[in-house]
Structures are given as structure tokens and as C-alpha cells.
Image: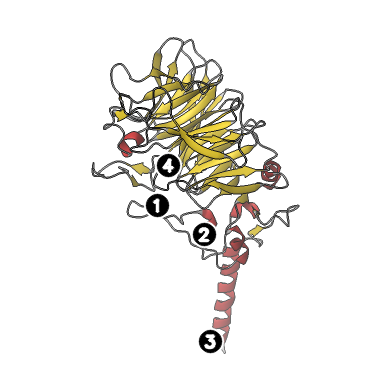
């Protein structure tokens, strides 16, 4: 009898431990209130802060990031509601703000299939022409692409400038001009006539109406820049750009001369100054609508050490490397804005945030792994747009800047129906 009592007590103790471990009110995921018939939207309750154990998610090992290392592919066998995240493009964590952003009828559509061995970067919307110009920074790709939104459905074609620019990785619109961050330093044949074009990594200005390109800066006191990655222009016309190592990674430039850093270039004077040098691989860059805060993403998860020179890309995946978005205060000075008060505001839950955009409302959008992070200005995750394929960058487009185009190695997507978010007029 005593033995039976001890067994019963052990069972009760185990049951109480299981209950304590659970500590959540199911369901974890549900169809969003007010959108019960919208099968493409799901709401995550309480940020899934407590999951019923056991649960499991894939993780990186041996220098490789597995494709299923994502929150939505986490295995949660004890709660069937989690399966609602499968094939659901809009995943909402903050219901009040997330549903305001999405509106009543958001849609995600795949518009173009593209080559799956190259990233797609530097998308810029040109309102006067109603087109998006973007780049394939890849060996042997010596021209850009243009999406014509005047056609129904939209069409895509090659786009060549004069002179041509090789391996553009970042782009922004400012006062009708496109500013490009280009990674390449090797000579290449012109797509127009086959003549040899000489180029150094730098910042270039394109007139989208004429196709004419002007070089703005291509060296730091006689040394090559590494490979300018992304760019943003402030209200005074100063150009801030990140200078990472990815041009070397894809073999379009030589081994880097400088450590990765972020710079400010002043076209008014020609002065080039460093403004930030603590990130592993500075990547996406954006500025808040009030011009007081700069956001820079770090993709230091890419590890360049010990990688053979004949390997492309020349990096492996380091799960302990930087995968953060940082905020900085922008302080005015006679030499231009400088940065202080660095603070991490977001740890990417999937891979790392590559392209970075800031909306008119101050939301931060990061192209991260298989989708887009939508954060508020303090780095809280409001929602995710899941596409099921890698995303490198994005761009708001259309007369009111409400359509969001997503660019990745295996496709180009368009999000329509958004109501509570708009792109900036110049970005």
C-alpha cells in the first residue's frame, strides 16, 4: 500500500511539473480576429513566449545555415494550432499594429521567376517612369534589370547605363536621381558594344531619364574601398554607405584593404569620413522619417576566415556572428551627421537582415532569410511576411508607395492591399 501511494505521489508530481512547464493558454496561433476567413493571415498569441515542451527548431552547424531554421518551421507537436503557420504568408505578432498595417485584404503574389544562383539587390522605384530598376550583383552580370509597371501584367527586361556599372548592390532615390553602391573593381566588357570598362568600387549617380552615370567617389585617399553595399542620402544630400566584404565574397573585387565600416560622403566638398567601425559586416542602412536615427544591419554571421580563395561565395555561416539591427543617434556637425549611442534593437530570428528600409510611419523592414521582418522604431517585431524562399531586398512602389516588392534568388514577389504602411517618397 505504501508503495502504491509513493507511485501515485510521483505521478502527481510529474503531472504538476508538466503543467508548470506548459504555462500557456492555447492556442499558440489562431486566425486573426476580424479576418477569420483570411487563410493567408495568422496571429501568434503572446509572441509564443511559452511553447509546450518538447519543441524543436533546426539550427546551424558545420558552417551551413539550414533552410528550415525558421520560427514558422519549429516543431511543436503538443499544439496543433502551430501548423496554421505552414504556407501562411502574413504572420502577425502585434495584433493592433500588425492588422492595421495589413488592412482587410493583403495579398502576396509571385510575379517573376528568376535565376536562382544570384542575389537580387538595389531595387529603386522611379515614380516619373513608374519602373523599378534593380541589380544582379553576380559574376558576369554587367547590366541591371528594369520592371515596367506600366504594363499589365508588369514586364521585365535588361537595363544598361552609360557607362555600364558592374555589381551594384545598393540603391536609393534622391531628388530624381538614383545613387548606387557598387562592389566591383575588375574590368569588364560593355554590354552595349563589348568595349572594356574600368571600374573601382564606389558610389555612382544615375539619371534614370537618360541612363547617364557619374562616379561620385571610388577611393579612400588612394586605397580601394572594399565593396560598398548599401546607401542612404540624408536631407542635406550627404551620402551614408556601408562598406562590407561581399564583393570579394562573390569574386568581383580584390581582397579587402580595410576592415568593414560605414562612411559619410559629402558631394558638396568631396570629403569621405568613417562614421562607424564596430559591426562585423555592415549591410542595410536607413534613416528614420524625422532624420534623427540611423539604422544599420550587421550580417556578421558570414565568416570569411579560412575559406579557400577559389570558393564562391567566400564565406561560411557563423551562428555566433552578428545578426543584429542597430540604432544610432544622428548628431549634426559642420562636417555632417555623426553617429552616437549605438544600441542593438533587433536580433534577427531567421538568418540576418540584409536590405533595410524605413517606412513613412517609421516602421523598419528587413529582408531576413525566408521573409521580411517588420519592426517598430524600437525593434519590436510587429509581423513577418513569409515567402518560402530567400529574400535579399525589397522596395515600395506605385503612386502611393503601398505595393511592396520583394527580391530574392529564386523569385520576385509583390505584396498588395497594405493599408497602414507606405514607403518614403525618396528611398
> Mark 4: which secondary structure?
loop
Residue 325 on image: x %, y %: 49, 37
> At 55% across and 77% down in the image, what residue appears?
10
Q: How crowded is mark 4: few (under 14 residues within 10 Å), some or many (20 or more)?
A: many
> Mark 3: which secondary structure?
helix
Tell me the CA gap for discs 3 and 1: 51 Å
Quadrant of the drawing holding the C terminus: top right
Tell me the CA gap for discs 1 and 4: 17 Å
Which of the 4 image quadrants contains residue 271? top left
Q: In the displayed structure, would residue 62 be above or below residue 337?
A: below
In-image side of 229 versus 234 (left or right): left
In-image side of 401 versus 182 (left or right): right
* Viewer-side label of 3, 2: 2
- Mark toward the start of the polypeptide (1 vs 4): 1
Which residue is under mark 4? 119
Residue 3: give its label: 3
Tell me the CA gap for discs 3 and 2: 41 Å
Amino acid at each position: 500500500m505504501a508503495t502504491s501511494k509513493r507511485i501515485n505521489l510521483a505521478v502527481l508530481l510529474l503531472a504538476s511539473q508538466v503543467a508548470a512547464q506548459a504555462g500557456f493558454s492555447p492556442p499558440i496561433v489562431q486566425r486573426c480576429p476580424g479576418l477569420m476567413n483570411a487563410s493567408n493571415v495568422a496571429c501568434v498569441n503572446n509572441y509564443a513566449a511559452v511553447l509546450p515542451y518538447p519543441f524543436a527548431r533546426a539550427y546551424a552547424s558545420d558552417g551551413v545555415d539550414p533552410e528550415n531554421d525558421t520560427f514558422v518551421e519549429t516543431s511543436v507537436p503538443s499544439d496543433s494550432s502551430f501548423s496554421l503557420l505552414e504556407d501562411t504568408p502574413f504572420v502577425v505578432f502585434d495584433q493592433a499594429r500588425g492588422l492595421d498595417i495589413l488592412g482587410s485584404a493583403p495579398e502576396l503574389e509571385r510575379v517573376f521567376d528568376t535565376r536562382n544562383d544570384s542575389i537580387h539587390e538595389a531595387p529603386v522605384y522611379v515614380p516619373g517612369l513608374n519602373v523599378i530598376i534593380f541589380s544582379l550583383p553576380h559574376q558576369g552580370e554587367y547590366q541591371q534589370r528594369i520592371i515596367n509597371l506600366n504594363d499589365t501584367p508588369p514586364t521585365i527586361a535588361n537595363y544598361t547605363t552609360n557607362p555600364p556599372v558592374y555589381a551594384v548592390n545598393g540603391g536609393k532615390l534622391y531628388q530624381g536621381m538614383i545613387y548606387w553602391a557598387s562592389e566591383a573593381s575588375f574590368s569588364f566588357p560593355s554590354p552595349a558594344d563589348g568595349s572594356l570598362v574600368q571600374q573601382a568600387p564606389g558610389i555612382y549617380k544615375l539619371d534614370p531619364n537618360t541612363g547617364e552615370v557619374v562616379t561620385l567617389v571610388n577611393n579612400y585617399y588612394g586605397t580601394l574601398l572594399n565593396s560598398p553595399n548599401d546607401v542612404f542620402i540624408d536631407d542635406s544630400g550627404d551620402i551614408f554607405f556601408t562598406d562590407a566584404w561581399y564583393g570579394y565574397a562573390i569574386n568581383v573585387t580584390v581582397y579587402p584593404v580595410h576592415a568593414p565600416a560605414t562612411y559619410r560622403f559629402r558631394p558638396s566638398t568631396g570629403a569621405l569620413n568613417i562614421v562607424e567601425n564596430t559591426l562585423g559586416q555592415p549591410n542595410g542602412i536607413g534613416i528614420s522619417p524625422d532624420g534623427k536615427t540611423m539604422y544599420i544591419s550587421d550580417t556578421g554571421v558570414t565568416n570569411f576566415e579560412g575559406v579557400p580563395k577559389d570558393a564562391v561565395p567566400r564565406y561560411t555561416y557563423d551562428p555566433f556572428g552578428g545578426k543584429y539591427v542597430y540604432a544610432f543617434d544622428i548628431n549634426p556637425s559642420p562636417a555632417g551627421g555623426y553617429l552616437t549611442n549605438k544600441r542593438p534593437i533587433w536580433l534577427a530570428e531567421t538568418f540576418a537582415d540584409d536590405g533595410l528600409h524605413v517606412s513613412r510611419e517609421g516602421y523598419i523592414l528587413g529582408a531576413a532569410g525566408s521573409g521580411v521582418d517588420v519592426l517598430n522604431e524600437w525593434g519590436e517585431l510587429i509581423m513577418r511576411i513569409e515567402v518560402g524562399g530567400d529574400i535579399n531586398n525589397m522596395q515600395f512602389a506605385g503612386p502611393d508607395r503601398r505595393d511592396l516588392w520583394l527580391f530574392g534568388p529564386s523569385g520576385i514577389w509583390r505584396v498588395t492591399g497594405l493599408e497602414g504602411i507606405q514607403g518614403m517618397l525618396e528611398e
